[in-house]
Amino acid sequence: MKTKQKIGLIGGGNMGAAILAGIVKDYTVTVCESDRKRAAVLKRRFRVSIGSLAEVVKNSRILIVAVKPQNFDAILIQLKLLCRKEHVIISIAAGITSRYMEKRLGANARIIRTMPNLPAQVGQGMTAVCKGGGATVADVKTTCRIFNCVGATVAVDEKWMDAVTAVSGSGPAYVFHFVEMFTNAARALGLDEKLSRDLVAQTLRGSLDLLEQSKEDAGTLRQRVTSKGGTTQAALEVFQKNKADKIFKEALGSAKRRARELAK
């Protein structure tokens, strides 16, 4: 039997727990969680070992840092003292650049920066992965294998991370907002709440599955649904009249600019 690779998870909050749920079957995970009650829950639920930061670093070559932003710098200070050159440090912190981490951990630190998103909680996340200057291509591949356990991954240059944040990092909120608007519009037609929710949810689910399985792009599929002079065209003309495409571009541009402003 092949020995499972060891991973140290630092932080067991919502995203940390989502990652843990996805990787625990394929990796041996030790968790460092400062909240004792939370640590007990994770230990009981996932049957993992709980340890101090020093113990986690000692027992794991790969470290996933999933702490809250206000605790991040304090963890970096400790990791500077504890980590060795063989450690791969994977951060999921939004807005924290690899350069920022390298200044605190050393230029040769093997740092991987990631941007997962909320659907990781149900194994359908999208995680962008980029390497710091001291990391290797193999480290990127290792990170992708880990995060493939909670969805899909893509390796990108760090210069694209602000755009990635605007698209997939914040993206679930856009989808939920669209669902809210779609459902409210259905209810305005006289449909009850449950029927509206069910119609919208299955329409989205089926449409995305069709897009994924089809060889055609979204524009072509849209045209296939749209008959000249029909109901779909009437609706789409309203979107076009109100410049929905422009609104969406402006929204993502605003998110990207804010991501850049917040970056360290």
Image: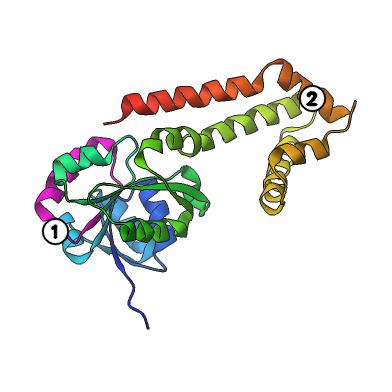
Residue 121: x %, y % from top left: 47, 50
Can residue 166 be seen in the rendering of this structure?
Answer: yes
Residue 122: x %, y % from top left: 52, 52
Q: Amino acid at mark 2?
A: Ala
Tell me how far mark 2 sits from mark 1, CA to CA.
59 Å
Report the residue that reaches farthest toward the right. 229
Q: Circle 2 — which element?
A: helix
Instruction: Indicate which disc residue 84 carries.
Output: 1
Residue stretch rendered in magenta on the structure: 66-88
The prevailing secondary structure element of the residues shown in magenta is helix
* Residue matched to label 2: 235
Please name whichever residue, 29 or 157, is drawn nearer the observer in this view of the structure: 157
Q: Circle 1 — which element?
A: loop
120 vs 185: above or below: below
Quadrant of the frame with the C terminus: top left
Question: Coloring scheme of the render?
Answer: rainbow
- Give the mark nearest the N terminus, 2 or 1: 1
Q: Kindly indicate the quadrant of the structure image that contains residue 49.
A: bottom left
Q: Amino acid at mark 1?
A: Arg
Residue 83: x %, y % from top left: 14, 56
Q: Kindly indicate the quadrant of the structure image that contains residue 262.
A: top left
Please name whichever residue, 237 or 44, is drawn nearer the observer in this view of the structure: 237
Q: Residues within 10 Å of mark 2 (few under 14, many from 20)?
A: few
Residue 199: x %, y % from top left: 75, 40
Q: Is residue 189 magenta?
A: no
